[in-house]
Amino acid sequence: MFGFIKRALKKTVQQIEESLPEKKRVATPEEIEELLIEADVEYDLVEQIVSSLPSKVTRIQLKNDLLYLLRNPPQKEVESHPFVELVIGVNGSGKTTTIAKLASRYKREGKSVILGAADTFRAAAIEQLKRWAERVGVPIVATKQGHDPSAVAYDTISKGIAKGIDHILIDTAGRLHTQSNLAEELKKIVRVCDKALPGAPHRKLLIIDGTQGNSAIQQAQTFNEMVGVDGIIVTKLDGTARGGALLSISNRLQLPILYVGTGEQMEDLVPFDPHEYIDTILDALFQ
């Protein structure tokens, strides 16, 4: 999979190189500050990084500093069959497409998958997920617009258990303009999942639109406060010059970035590799 993240960060690297066209063996704190700002790293974090740097900085020194910012508490390992994942995020973040990509990835690994269309607020979301389920070749539990999303989640888990499914992926609504309603709805879905299968959902995945850069941080914090997020997937990374925002998002939330979306194809959802990510950004400045 090496090279997917590098290609996805192409626009970010181009933006940095336009500002810093000369490659360095060692860089000054001022040059590193410009590098990070051009990549859309949050300004407070840029100041924190730069304030601790010596007058001359090598690539390996900076890489180690940036990797340290991506460290996160180890994920709890959960052994469950089926393994239930609740997928959350605002409308337009690429949530439904990401569910399809995850389902396709699990299928390629030889696992069975079922989808639950629990975003019953929008009829379009249900229909879109149905089309993806058909395209990927996995079953789906869906109902009509306006029905109880918790009931969909319960039915999906029950069906998954009955059929011996490996992975259950449940879509949810993401209408942040009615935060209190959404929070109560998501909390209820979590409670109902646990009734259907004690311990479920085993992972709550937050989908973030990479083109939003640092503006996605507040959005992510809101969802984390609602139900507690276990991991992040960043979509549309190939369509933005704001790739440095992943540093800010991971550091501020203290949550792992699990996957990144690197294109339109089914296989364009790859595990996040911190080393490849940092190396790609540093390639824009260092020899």
Image (spheres, rainbow, N blue to C red):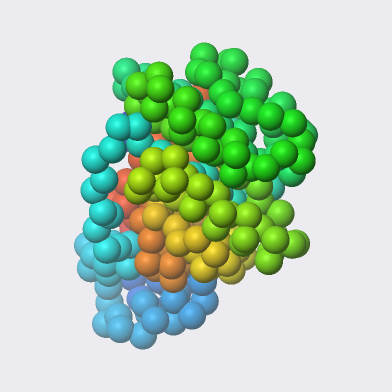
In this rendering, the answer to whether 153 lies above or below 68 is above
Return the residue found at the far front.
195
Q: Tell me where residue 225 appears, x and y as whole percent.
A: 52, 68
Q: Is residue 181 left or right of residue 75?
A: right
Name the residue nearer the viewer: 249 or 46: 249
In this rendering, the answer to whether 206 lies above or below 84 is below
Image quadrant holding the N terminus, namely top left
Name the residue nearer the viewer: 149 or 285: 149
Q: Tell me where residue 44 appears, x and y as whole percent.
A: 48, 80
**Residue at 44% of width from left, 76% of height from top?**
45
**Residue at 40% of width from left, 22% of height from top?**
162
Q: Tell me where residue 50 appears, x and y as whole percent.
A: 38, 79
Image quadrant holding the C terminus, namely bottom left
**Residue 6 occupies which quadrant of the picture?**
top left
Q: Is residue 108 visible?
A: yes
**Residue 196 occupies which quadrant of the picture?**
top left
Name the residue nearer the viewer: 221 or 66: 221
In this rendering, the answer to whether 96 lies above or below 278 is above
